[in-house]
Amino acid sequence: MVSMSKRAFWSLFLPAWKQAFTRKNIASGFEKTGIWPCDPSLVLTTITKPQSIEPEEDSQSPKTPMTSRAIRRIQRAYEKAPVKSMLALIFRANERLAAQHSIDEHVRKGLTEALRHEKKKRQRGKRLNLLGEEDSGPQFFSPARVQAARDWQAIKDTKEALRQQGIVDKKALAAAKKQQKELNKIERARLLAKRRQQAAEAKAQKAVEKQAQIELKEVVNRHNKGRLELKRQSTGPQKVQKSRKKQARGPNNTVITQQVEGVVLTTSRGRRLQRPQRFAI
């Protein structure tokens, strides 16, 4: 199916070599041919045709069924007349069909493997292009071109190494940025928590101060209320007397007292006044 190549030859040769070239097989080969131990009769009996009378095969014996139709036919015949000869034919047919199936499976796998090798063999490899030249024809290398190819390959390897180093540096920089970002995030979270704690403490302090002011105000109010109540209790009679005097006070800052016989004028201190006659009513 495919032409033999070095690639296919080695993969086929090596397993056969390991299996065939053993100490036991080599000694058996010398012994079977009569080389050692020396026995010429082994070769002579092999090349001499024996004269033996074999019994003729019975022409009437049925053939081994090898098709589906023949197997069904002999199966029906065996169901009608179950004899050992038909059962032996059925077993022999099964053995031959199983062997044929194994052979077909082996051939199929071999053909598949051969096609895979052929497809792999027909794949064209890449041109060497040792100097980076766009040349599809044969390339001839002088010592100068060999040195130029080495220099070009060294430059190419250096560029590849720089590219790989750039990739590594880029990954390291990205990792460092990511780590710094995580640290900044943690720091911001810590500052935010600290600010929230300070705000909560300030709010609690403000609430305590406000409560203290309210309590102080209540205490002052109670104190002022008590003082006012004491003042009211101490100045109550005087206010009543003053109010009475104010009601009895006249236009000339005098207190008018009434008696049964007439009007008597007195000052605020209780001194009696005598109204002149000309002002008498």
Image: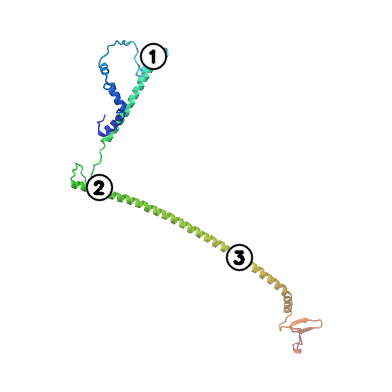
Q: Which of the two labelled residues, at mark 3 and mark 2, occupies the earlier sequence position?
A: 2
- Which of the colour schemes (rainbow, by chain, secondary structure, one colour) is used? rainbow
Q: CA distance from mark 3 to mark 2?
A: 87 Å
Name the residue beneath numbered marker 2.
Answer: 153
Name the residue beneath numbered marker 1.
Answer: 86
The reply, left or right, for residue 154 in relation to residue 105 is left
Callout 2 crowding tier (Cα within 10 Å): few <14, some 14–19, many ≥20: some
Image marks 1 and 2: residues in contact by CB distance under 8 Å: no
Q: Quadrant of the C terminus?
A: bottom right
Callout 1 crowding tier (Cα within 10 Å): few <14, some 14–19, many ≥20: some
Above or below for 171 versus 137? below
Callout 3 crowding tier (Cα within 10 Å): few <14, some 14–19, many ≥20: few
Q: In this rendering, which labeled residue sits more in front, label 1 or label 3?
A: 1
* Residue 183 seen in this snapshot: yes
Disc 2 is placed on an element classified as helix
Name the residue beneath numbered marker 3.
Answer: 212
Disc 1 is placed on an element classified as helix
Relative to the observer, which residue lies in front, 218 or 62?
62
Image marks 1 and 3: residues in contact by CB distance under 8 Å: no
The reply, left or right, for residue 113 in relation to residue 140 is right
Residue at x-position 72% and y-position 74%: 234
Mark 1 residue type: Met
Residue 203's x, y, as percent? 55, 62
Q: Quadrant of the N terminus?
A: top left
Residue at x-position 54% and y-position 61%: 201
Mark 3 residue type: Ala
* Residue 73 seen in this snapshot: no
